[in-house]
């Protein structure tokens, strides 16, 4: 996991969510006399360190390995999972090549799937804000944001009769987006769609606030991180997204997780904590199934994971298809407030 570096804002809560799941599974004796042991290695948000950490954990005999919030870090690890035949869980990356049955599984659902939360996002924004024009800002160096995903936002705008004034490419590593913000303010669109990493969205919000943008901003769920708010501060007020998980959801399963997390850590979980929690529970389902059919080995675990067709996540029921989670529920839409709290904009969760 990325515990330091630019992706640390995702990895730290993921680790906490995973630790909570391990504690619950062990204390409930879900796996009988067997106990899960979680070993964490910080990849420092770099591909080289991620590869090294994966190989070290593999050589130490880990029965399964969790990794991957971002696609660039994840894809080479999925290739290792296949070549080394190690059951692995992708916690958050959604780009091409991150899953590979029977070894690599993604336990977060694909936001860009037809009718998924990205489609729901642009449709909800069109219905509620009624924008006539939009500017799209996207990370050009990640296939989780560029290419077909960028086109999805364009198609959504077209579907809702929103004129796209421009599509602005930025690098995910960029920290100063003031020039982009200046361009947007000059064009004065009704809506800005920021399909960027959380850090980028936060920096963009700072620039838009500084230069006086008065329109609406719609973004992806990466901005759910408290770390993202800490970068943007009060300028984050009003930015809206559909999270994979939200503490504001009325789903009973979600609320049980929130209570357990708050009891252990003294703070509310974000969706990245939920991703870590879900990943461990999915892995445990496979281990339990393998136990019931004999011994637990990497090969038997891979087979067991491939046999899971549905499971309960912090959102509710997920199904699996070709190694990837699918969720057909309706999105809840939330926004940051200037004081660092979140509130529901649309939907009930």
Image (spheres, helix red, strand yellow):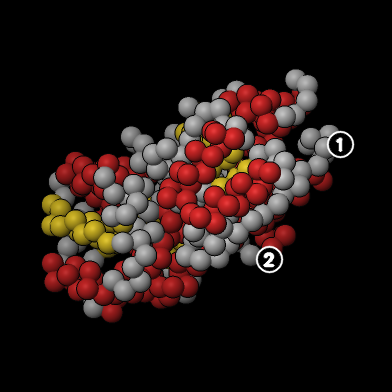
Q: Position of residue 225 (x, y in %)?
A: 49, 62
CA gap, disc 1 to disc 2? 30 Å
Say whether residue 51 is visible: yes
- Find numbered disc 2 in the image and state the secondary structure of the residue it sits on: loop
User: Mark 1 or mark 2: which is in front?
Assistant: 1
Seen from the viewer's position, the closer of residues 134 and 69 is 69
For label 2, the residue is 266
Name the residue located 45 percent from the left edge and 43 percent from the top edge. 75
Q: Bin the neighbour count of mark 2 within 10 Å (Cα to Cα): few under 14, some 14-19, many 20 and up.
A: few
Seen from the viewer's position, the closer of residues 111 and 266 is 111
Q: Position of residue 159 (x, y in %)?
A: 19, 41
Seen from the viewer's position, the closer of residues 123 and 63 is 63
Name the residue located 17 percent from the left edge and 70 percent from the top edge. 183
Relative vertical location of residue 181 with respect to residue 331 in this rendering, above or below: below
Q: Position of residue 188 (x, y in %)?
A: 15, 67
* Mark 1 vs 2, N-terminal side: 1
- Find numbered disc 1 in the image and state the secondary structure of the residue it sits on: loop
Name the residue located 86 percent from the left edge and 36 percent from the top edge. 33
Name the residue located 70 percent from the left edge and 38 percent from the top edge. 63
Label annotation for residue 33? 1
Left/right placement of residue 124 relative to residue 18 reads left
Relative vertical location of residue 338 with respect to residue 60 in this rendering, above or below: below
Q: Position of residue 117 (x, y in %)?
A: 38, 44
Seen from the viewer's position, the closer of residues 98 and 204 is 98
């Amino acid at each position: 996991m990325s515990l330091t570096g630019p992706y640390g804002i995702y990895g730290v809560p993921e680790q906490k969510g995973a630790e909570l799941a391990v504690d619950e599974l062990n204390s409930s004796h879900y796996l009988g006399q067997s106990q899960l042991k979680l070993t964490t290695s910080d990849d420092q948000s770099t591909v080289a360190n991620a590869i090294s950490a994966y190989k070290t954990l593999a050589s130490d005999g880990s029965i399964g390995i969790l990794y991957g919030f971002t696609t660039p870090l994840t894809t080479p690890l999925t290739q290792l999972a296949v070549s080394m035949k190690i059951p692995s869980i992708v916690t958050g990356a959604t780009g091409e090549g991150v899953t590979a049955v029977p070894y690599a599984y993604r336990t977060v659902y694909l936001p860009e799937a037809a009718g998924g939360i990205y489609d729901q996002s642009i449709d909800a924004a069109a219905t509620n804000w009624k924008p006539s024009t939009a500017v799209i800002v996207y990370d050009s160096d990640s296939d989780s944001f560029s290419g077909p995903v960028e086109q999805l936002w364009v198609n959504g705008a077209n579907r809702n009769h929103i004129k796209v004034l421009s599509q602005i490419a930025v690098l995910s590593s960029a920290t100063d987006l003031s020039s982009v913000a200046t361009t947007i303010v000059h064009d004065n669109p009704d809506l800005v769609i920021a399909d960027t990493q959380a850090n980028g969205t936060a920096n963009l919000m700072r620039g838009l606030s500084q230069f006086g943008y008065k329109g609406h901003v719609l973004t992806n769920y990466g901005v759910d991180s408290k770390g993202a708010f800490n970068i943007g501060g009060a300028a984050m007020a009003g930015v809206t997204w559909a999270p994979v998980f939200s503490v504001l959801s009325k789903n009973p399963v979600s609320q049980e997780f929130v209570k357990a997390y708050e009891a252990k850590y003294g703070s509310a979980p974000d969706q990245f904590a939920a991703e870590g929690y879900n990943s461990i529970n999915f892995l445990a389902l496979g281990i339990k199934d393998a136990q019931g059919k004999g011994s637990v080995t990497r090969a038997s675990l891979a087979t067991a994971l491939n046999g899971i067709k549905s499971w309960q996540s912090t959102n509710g029921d997920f199904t699996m298809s070709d190694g990837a989670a699918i969720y057909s529920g309706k999105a809840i839409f939330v926004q940051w407030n200037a004081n660092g709290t979140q509130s529901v904009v649309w939907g009930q969760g």
